[in-house]
Amino acid sequence: MPSSRELLLELQQIVDRPIRIMVVCGTHNRAILRYDLRNRLPQNLELVSGPGCTVCVMPSGHIDVVVKIARQPDVITATCEDLLQVKGTRESLASVRQKGAQVEVISSPRECLAIAEANPDKIIVYPAVGFEATAPGIAEVILEAASRGVDNFCVIPSIRLLPPTLDSLLADPHLNIDGLLCSDHINSLSDTEAYTGLAKKHHLACCIAGFEQEDILRCLLNMVGQIKSGVAQVDNLSTVVYSSEEYVKAKQMVTEVFFAVDTIWRGLGIIEESGFVIRDELSLYDATKRFNVRLPDEEIHCQCICGMIMSGLGLPPDCPDFGKGCTTGHPIGPCMLSSEGICASYYKYTLENSHPV
Ligand code: SF4
């Protein structure tokens, strides 16, 4: 296997024109900064950020709903750690936990069923914040709860779908993107045909890669090769491979539980059919129905330019607050608050400390 030095040298040799790649996933953005790749890539190869940070794209009104439900006396909220500190208009799950709300950090939605069975007098609420790749796992837990008769468990459906959002962003001629660097996080067991459709429609080179620097560099080389030869397709260089049975099963479960509706993204507005809600037949497992609350479809505006950055139209240093009013210790916007946020990654690896490899 060629080393990162050799891969970088090869890239220097083959990039002979300006090329713009969107790094869709927050974890990839973080890895690229950690390995200082932005400073080591050919000058003509520009990397811009995409909307692939689940916490960053969640509107503050949705956090308000999560917090409102968490404050109910008979509720245990089971959440991923990343969502804990995210503030709505006033409160976060962490702040209401300090005031007595029962909030537990879990690493998988599956854990909700054990918590539900151990606490039959409580309702376990799982805020389902994630992209399409998380949908099969959540659908599976809902179906299992239904088949086992676990009725004190429900989900706040806040799953967002990247393909329609990327489609909407890529329609902007100013963006001028040549390729999408995708990760397993956003593509595993999801609708891979959607990415193939995007590649064809916008004439994009797409490549799926892991998070080591060699993985990313191989993927960039693949995309540059596609672009130079006029190819527009999705290549998977990831070592994570699923069988066709797993894809079929995942798709079946997702279709049985969810359907897509127009959904609001923080900083990006409402995007057609870009979010999942739970089907009426399974409304017992839908926390918005159970608690009679609505996920708002309007945004509360603030000075933060996260939306612009997540659309590939800027980078954190373009924000006047970056590293001044807004730091990881005092975040203004979600891109600084989430560990997967591009501003937090930029802050950590370019201001707080640097890790040249
Ligand atoms: S630096 Fe802070 S205020 Fe500026 S875009 Fe990022 S999160 Fe928003």
Image: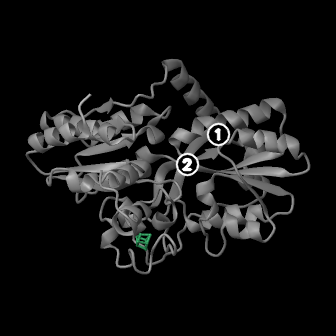
Q: Considering only vertical position in the picture, is 325 above or below 345? A: below
Label 2: how many Cα within 10 Å (few below 14, some 14–19, many 20+): many
How far apart, in angstroms, are the residues tagged by discs 2 and 1?
10 Å
Percent of width and height locating residue 327: 45, 73
Quarter of the rendering containing residue 217: top left
Q: Residue at x 62, y 36 (%)?
A: 137
Percent of width and height locating residue 28: 38, 48
Horizontally, residue 341 falls left or right of residue 97, namely left
Q: Considering only vertical position in the picture, is 168 above or below 233? A: below
Quarter of the rendering containing residue 326: bottom left
Q: Earlier in the sequence, mark 2 or mark 1?
A: 2
Q: Which residue is mark 2?
A: 130
Horizontally, residue 233 falls left or right of residue 184, namely left
**Kind of residue sitting beneath label 2:** Gly
Q: Residue at x 62, y 30 (%)?
A: 253
Number of dots carrying numbers? 2
**Kind of residue sitting beneath label 1:** Ile
| Numbered badge on residue 89 | none
Q: Which residue is mark 1?
A: 138
Asked whether residue 257 is in view, the answer is no
